[in-house]
Structures are given as structure tokens and as C-alpha cells.
Amino acid sequence: MKLKSYFSWKNFLPNCITPQVPSSGLKVHPSKRSSSQRVSLSDISHCDSPLLLSDLSNSLVSLHVFTLKELQPITHFFSKSNFLGEGGFGSVYKGFIDDNLRPGLKAQSVAVKVLDLDGTQGHKEWLAEVIFLGQLKHPHLVNLIGYCYEDEQRLLVYEHMERGSLENQLFKRYGPPLPWLTRLKIAVGTAKGLTFLHEEEKPVIYRDFKTSNILLDLAYNAKVSDFGLATDGPGEEETYVTTCVMGTKGYAAPEYISTGHLTTMSDVFSFGVVLLELLTGRQSVDKTRPAREKNLVEWARPLLKNPHKLHLIMDPRLEGQYSTEGARKATALAYQSLSNYPKSRPTMRNVVKALQPLLDLTDIPIGPFVYIVPTQDNEVPVVQKIEERYAKQCNEVKIEKNDVEKQEKEEKSQIPCRKGRTHRRRVKHSRSRAIYSDTDLYKTLGSSLYTPKH
Ligand SMILES: Nc1ncnc2c1ncn2[C@@H]1O[C@H](COP(=O)(O)OP(=O)(O)O)[C@@H](O)[C@H]1O
Ligand SMILES: [Mg+2]
């Protein structure tokens, strides 16, 4: 798959990021970059000369380059009926690729994200997605299949995720609430995705972790998507300071907002907010609530400290159907992740370690307020339905655990180890529902708040 020859690097510099490089200098010329290294946004911004096209096409071998003409018919010309959702970048449409489109590309449902040319985001965010998702493959990151780059047009083609965003599933007004074990499964899945990013040789800071950027497949396997704001973390001798803060209100870490210091711990804070949303069923910012409750973290923090206040924290829609021990441990973890001191937050690996065992806790009441409805001859009594629902929850979680473990084993054994290259996990993921999701990008800091490293 070749990149088009007019693909120029000159205007690709992510100008908000100011890496503070020590005077010894860490500039790596692209041609001296080892072939095992991932092409990173900072490689591009550090270098005076543009990266060689061949460098990029080697690293993004798995991506298909689509034409606009190919993507129009598969989405019914981006029709309303194919609309899946939207954010700061633009709208996302469902499409179907048949096996005649490209040799080697199997028939499948896809999601096509189209840059809104009048919107707040643009080429830089598109490029970040291509660069990161073109190289990073993991069961808990959405699979980018390809992209389209024509004149001003920028599109991205992903695997289709059947249940859409977590925002849609968690905060929908109608239908049954997400059960406890499903919420935990989602938290564990996304924590694994973030761990993978943070533990890359050159760590990746995701920077926009929130419910609308978490996608769910049919079995509620969670995948982190939307890498538009992702950035390479600082190396050992560097620290990053940004002159403009990007992210979403209600999720961004306090030190990042006030000083522009960006670390993997900023993602941990945002993870804490999402975990809190999963526990409480409340949105990170809810303007319809009384003043003291509008900001979820501010409202919840004093309650999280006190184990006796657990019932005030937990989503009333769960109707008590959760493991008390699990909920206590999860709220304690949320409290730690939401610390105002980045160093007091756990690493994402430790978050996974703390959350994963909670999936095995069985002290989940079937429901204290079950009213047994007298049934007709062929109807299933209510209690049985609830038991079935619980069994289904457990089953879904087990399936996911087995699937992911199996997938990971298969990947390890299947990926050929090319000389001088690190392994990249490559996984084919499975896959909508329309939802408006607001990528509320905001720029709160002027250059007056720029904090150089001393
Ligand atoms: N692969 C996908 N499958 C299903 N729905 C998707 C997919 N990608 C995005 N969506 C829907 O579109 C919304 C916006 O997508 P996102 O990638 O976050 O766009 P933006 O970069 O504009 O914020 C998501 O919240 C989700 O509802
Ligand atoms: Mg988004």
C-alpha cells in the first residue's frame, strides 16, 4: 500500500507541543531512526528535514489508502441513515466493504470518519490518528483499516463497533442499564488499552480519554478510539509542556489544565473520571444538576473517601446489583486515580491489577426488591429473568476473558519476527448507533502560562 506522492510533511508539525530537550540534544534524524522504532509525531516535529516517504509506508503497511469515490457508495453517499455519531473532527458513517473492493481486504462493516472542513480540528488530528493507529495494534484499541487523503478531504476508515460509544450505552435514557459486570469489563478493557500505550518503548499519551471515545463491540469488548489528540510522551530526559491545553472539560487532569504539564498520569486522571462515570451513572459534567453536583469529580471526591457513603456514589439504576466489595475497591481506585498529585495516582498497569480480580467477585445480590409477578402459563417469572440476566453478564465477561487471552496467545505465535523489528500486535477486531458526542476541545492557556522546565 503506497502513500501518495503529494503526501508532504511540512505542515504536519504539532505546534502545541513544546518538547523540552536538554542541551545535549536528542534530535534524531529520520534516516538514522532504527527500523524497529515507531514513526512518531515527535520524530516529525524534531527534525528539520521531512521524513522519507518510504519510512512511513514501511511503518503503515497494514493501512489501505482509499479514494473518496470508493468511500461514497459504501456509505450511501454519507447519508443520514448511515450516521453513527460525531465529535470535534467530524461525522462518522457506517459503511459496508464487499470483498471486491480490494484484494486482501475482507468483506466487513466499517465506520468512516469525515473531517468537517469548517470544524475545530483538521489535518494534524487526522495525521495523529493515521500515525498512531496505523502502527499500534491491540485488542483494546480500535482497528484503523485505512484512510483517504484527497485535496482538502481527510477521512479515516475503522472497523465498525456494533454498540457504538460507551457514552451512548451508559447514559441512554431508555432500555436496561449497563449491568455491573459489564461496566467492570469495560473499565478493565480500556485500562489494558491505556497500559499498552503507556508501556510502548516511546510512551503514548492518549490525552482525550472519555466515554465518547470508548467503543463497544457486540460482546461489550471495549476499545479506545479517536487518537486525534494523542501524542508521544517525553523520553527519559525530557518533559513536555504544552502552550495550549487540549482535551475535554470534566476529564482533563488539574495540573495539565493549570500548568500544561502532560504525562501519562494525565491519562490516569481521565481514566478515574470514566471509572467514576461507570460507578455513578453520572456524566463528568452535567449542567442540568444542582450547582454542587454539576462537576462529577468535585461532587464525588468527599464521598469516595468514606466507605460508608458507597450507596450514595453507586448508580441507583443498578438497584444494588453489584458486588459491595468490588464497588468499594473500585471507588477507592477511582479516588486514587483522581488525586490532585500526579505521583499519587496509580500506573495503568496497577489499575488493571486492581480491577481485574473484581470480575471474579460473586457477592452480587440478585436484587433485594424483586417483585414476583404472577405469570401466565408460558411466561418466564421475573426472578428467573433476573437470574438469567446475571448468568448472561457472567458469561459475557468470561467469554471476553477467554477470547482476549486466546487472541493474545495467537498473536504472539503468529506474528513473524522480522529482523530488527519489534513485534506489533495485529488483531482483527469485530465492530452502531447514532449518538451525538461532543469533543469539547478547548484552549484555556495562553503563552503566559507556559511553564518551561527548570
Ligand atoms: N468505529 C466506530 N464504530 C461505531 N461507531 C463509531 C466508530 N467510530 C466512531 N463512532 C461514533 O462516532 C462518534 C464520534 O467518533 P470519534 O472518533 O470520537 O470522532 P471525533 O474525533 O470527531 O471526536 C463516537 O462517539 C461514536 O458514537
Ligand atoms: Mg471523539
Image (spheres, helix red, strand yellow):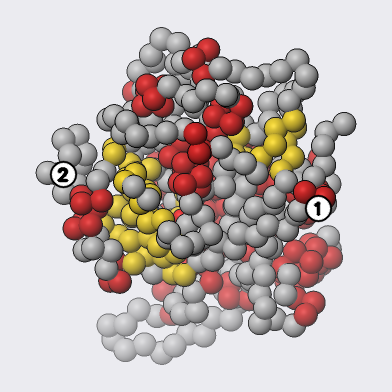
- Residue, far top: 419
User: Distance of mark 1 from mark 2, alpha carbons?
Assistant: 49 Å
> Residue at label 2?
101
Q: Quadrant of the N terminus?
A: top left
Left or right for 437, reference 325: left
Which residue lies under the disc numbered 1?
258
Q: Is residue 8 visible?
A: yes
Q: Position of residue 141 (x, y in %)?
A: 46, 43
Q: Is mark 2 within 8 Å of ligand 1?
A: no
- Residue 39 horizontal side relative to residue 243, left or right: left
- Which quarter of the rendering shows the C terminus? top right
- In percent of width and height, residue 369 lies at 58, 81
Q: For numbered disc 2, what is the local secondary structure? A: loop
Residue 160 left/right relative to 382: left
Does dot 1 land on a helix, a strand or a loop?
Answer: helix
Kind of residue at disc 2: Leu
Q: Residue at x 70, y 32 (%)?
A: 19
Residue at image x 52%, y 85%?
371
